[in-house]
Amino acid sequence: MLTFITRRLLFLPVVLIGVTLMIFVAMSFLTPAQLVSAYIKSPEELKNQSVSELVVKYGLDQPIWVRYINWMKNVLKGDLGYSVSANMHVTEAIAKRFPATLELAIFAVIPVIFGGIWLGTVSAKNHNQPLDHASRIFAIVGWSLPDFVFGLIILLIFYGLAGWFPPGRLSVWADNIILSGDFVQYTGMNTIDALLNGRFDIFLDALRHLVAPTITLAYLWWAYILRITRSSMLDVLNKDYVRTARAKGLMERLVINRHVRRNAMIPVVTVVGSMILGLLSGVVIVETVFDYKGIGLLIAKGAQQMDYTLVLGTSLFYGVLLVLTNLVVDVLYAVIDPRVRLE
């Protein structure tokens, strides 16, 4: 196990180099003058120096491989550059915005995993019955509907018509309290920080703003987990050892919990890693639709303003998450299925 984890961690630099190199190649189609905004480290540089001087200063007239090596040297020093669109260093922007995205992802993951597995189990147990058909329709609609379309529908119904779940992270009054200085931001996640500060009113307000983007982000993967769980459960229910357990007179609840569900979870675990990464990447669309100030909205605005320093830094950050998440999923896969050996 330790050898496997070590080898996967050693593979991390290869993934990060591949991701960032692809972006650098895409950037090579732009002129040095267009890339200047991606390399400045403070707003004052735009005032005190001309574009041509900045091009020479940051070596943007050099070959792409030279620029890439120079950028990697800065990364190894912990310098991801300055983001013009965020008006701060990239590391600061990620640290400031990622807690909001993580909060949204956590609220989406909980109903996806538990709700999707439960609905998939119920659907399999009631195979070809009305409840099963309803669950399958739910899954097909969820898997077919694009995030932005479903998000706009949710926004129209629950905010435009009902006025229940507004966009953004907080109401103006709650945002003013947080920015006043009397509110301590321990984690950057409004729901947790509100409880730690004893402000249940802010907690409820943050929760109200989370409902619509959470439903939008979770629905697609909820439907996917439902389909995977149902299919896997139906496959396991037809195994010989399940028939033997029933022939022994075991209660159906024990058959499901002891013999079926554990084995049926193996395919589900394999898609959990993809689901988590999908949630984190899906926030770019969802946060844009709901004006939710997380890292997804940050990336979207950075790309619109050609802030390639920000795009590179966040790509590097997501690359690390990709490898670490897949590592955790592989380890969990081996824990659930003892027949699997990590080599």
Image (cartoon, helix red, strand yellow):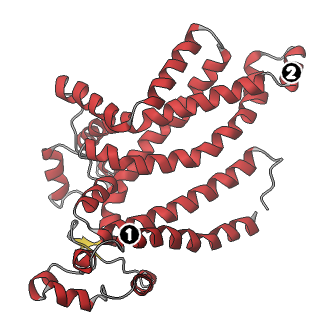
Q: Is label 2 in a helix, a strand or a loop?
A: helix
Q: Is residue 35 left or right of residue 234?
A: left
As rendered, which of 95 and 275 lies closer to the eye?
Answer: 275
Q: Amino acid at mark 2?
A: Ala
Q: Residues within 10 Å of mark 1 (few under 14, many from 20)?
A: many
> Residue reaching furthest left?
47
> Residue reaching furthest top?
130
Residue for point 21% across, 87% down: 54
Asked if residue 44 is positioned above or below residue 194 in the image, the reply reads below
Asked if residue 60 is positioned above or below residue 120 in the image, the reply reads below
Residue 312 numbered mark, or none: 1
Q: Is residue 266 left or right of residue 239?
A: left
Q: How many marks?
A: 2
Tell me which numbered mark, 1 or 2, is placed earlier along the sequence. 2
Tell me the quarter of the image containing the C terminus: bottom right
Q: Is residue 159 left or right of residue 146?
A: left
Residue 156: quarter of image = top left
As rendered, which of 314 and 170 lies closer to the eye?
Answer: 314
Between the residue at mark 1 and the residue at mark 2, the CA separation in whole angstroms equals: 55 Å
Residue 181: quarter of image = bottom left
Q: Nearer the viewer, mark 1 or mark 2?
A: 1
Tell me the quarter of the image containing the N terminus: bottom right
Residue for point 34% across, 71% down: 29
Q: Position of residue 307 (x, y in %)?
A: 27, 68
Q: Amino acid at mark 1?
A: Leu
Q: Is residue 187 visible?
A: no
Q: Position of residue 92 (x, y in %)?
A: 31, 70
Tell me the residue that label 2 is attached to: 245
As rendered, which of 18 and 220 lies closer to the eye?
Answer: 18
Q: Position of residue 77 (x, y in %)?
A: 42, 85
